[in-house]
Image (tube, rainbow, N blue to C red):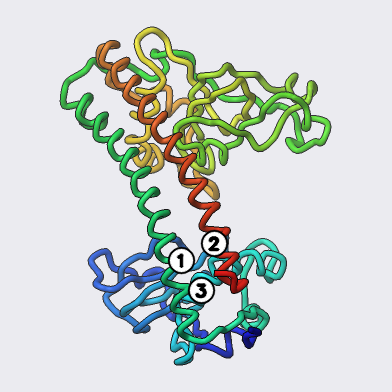
Amino acid sequence: MKYPQKSLLDICEVSTGKRDANHASINGKYPFFTCAEIPLKSDTFSFSGEGIILPGNGANVGLVLYCNGDFEAYQRTYVLHKFNSQVEPRYVYYHLIKEWKIKNSNFQYGSATNYIRMQNFEDYKILIPPLFEQKRTVRILEKANSIRQKRQRVIKLADDFLRSVFLDMFGDPVNNPYNWDLKAFEDLGTLARGKSKHRPRNDPRLLGGPYPLIQTGDIANANHYIKSYSGTYSELGLKQSKLWPKGTLCITIAANIADTAIMTFDACFPDSVVGFTPNSMVNTEYIHMWLSFFQKILRDQAPESAQKNINLKILSELQMPVPPKDTQNNFSEIFKKIEKLKKKLLSSSELIDNSFTSLTQRAFRGDL
């Protein structure tokens, strides 16, 4: 059966939020949707019922959020609400999850900052089957999505457990309640900035060779261990840089301040990253976790500038508790076991994600 095809403007109202970011309230009663994935809180609400919230500009253009209840919206978001009585909002929500980012990737307006406008909603077409068929599709997709979310929660619980183990074994890193001996970070191993002497840094002659090049984004997205890289150096690139050994702890000092991750292969990195290799007093996993707790303090210490950054001196002078090496090694073993478990969970999670994507494609082709 051939179903009618309609634009988003034909099946619901599309409004923009009216509040600026300062409207947020820590103890607010209602969700306050901004352009971020996690909503803030608000003391007021401007929308009621089922709504789909779409960031209107910035890096999260393409994100799709859903709310059923009273909520508030940021002025640079679009809200789909007051749906036609023959349209199931969650059917539209799942369709947007599948297609919104893809269909708008080549039709975003703007240069430095991407943004969308009403034309995007006019151009977005969706097949509208009978309401009972929409509801059936939603029931199937929500069961599948529930499995995905449960697996994601298990992975998060593994990370939460690791942090809990660290606190139990070593106490709060800021307060050092077990009164471990304190040592300056620079006394615990080799601490040095990466190298990228050549200018411009993106000179094509430096790139495209056999030597992995780690950037700050690779570290921020690594989740403990760096297992991939976004670029490579040529022989010329290597000459103006340095190849750091597998096991080096990478610490970002610009852009994403004090993100850390451990390299699983030899690699180069620029001077926006500091490399650390431990001496006999500490192990890498302990230092990595200690810094993750201390990250906010380091960010607060960063000098105010157009782009915040910290320097090697700030890191070198950090006073770190040094527990007995056996205790650190015990933690390291637990750390590695949890990472092994997470690897299995992530592998099965990827299979579940792929199955969900395939199921979604079939659903909107009418093949369920």
Give the SS element for disc 3: loop
Looking at the picture, how far across and down is residue 351, in whole percent?
Answer: 51, 46
| Lateral position of residue 335 relative to residue 324, left or right | right
Q: Do the CB atoms of the residues marked 3 and 2 lie less than 8 Å apart?
A: no
Q: Looking at the picture, does residue 135 appear above or below residue 262?
A: below
Name the kind of residue labelled 3 in the image. Arg
Earlier sequence position, callout 3 versus callout 2: 3
In the displayed structure, would residue 212 be above or below residue 140?
above
Q: Looking at the picture, which amino acid does disc 2 mark? A: Leu
Please state, as top left, top right, bottom left or bottom right, where the N terminus lies in the image. bottom right
Q: Nearer the viewer, residue 324 or 138?
A: 138
Instruction: Please identify the residue farthest to the top as the structure is shown.
Output: 280
Residue at which label 1 appears: 141
- The residue carrying mark 2 is 359
- Residue 281 sits above or below residue 340 on the image: above
Image position, residue 98 (x, y; %): 57, 65
Q: Disc 1 marks which amino acid?
A: Leu
Circle 2 crowding by C-alpha within 10 Å: few under 14, some 14–19, many from 20: some
Give percent across and percent down for residue 239. Answer: 75, 19
Cβ atoms at labels 2 and 1 below 8 Å apart = yes
Q: Residue at x 49, y 79 (%)?
A: 134
Q: Are marks 1 and 3 in contact (CB under 8 Å)?
A: no
Classify residue 271 as left or right of residue 310. right
**83 horizontally vs 290: left or right:** right
Q: Sort mark 3 into few (<14), some (14-19) or many (20+) by Cα contacts within 10 Å.
A: many
Within-10-Å neighbours for mark 1: few <14, some 14–19, many 20+: some
Q: Nearer the viewer, mark 1 or mark 3?
A: 1
Check residue 76 in the rendering and tell me which mark sits there, or answer none: 3
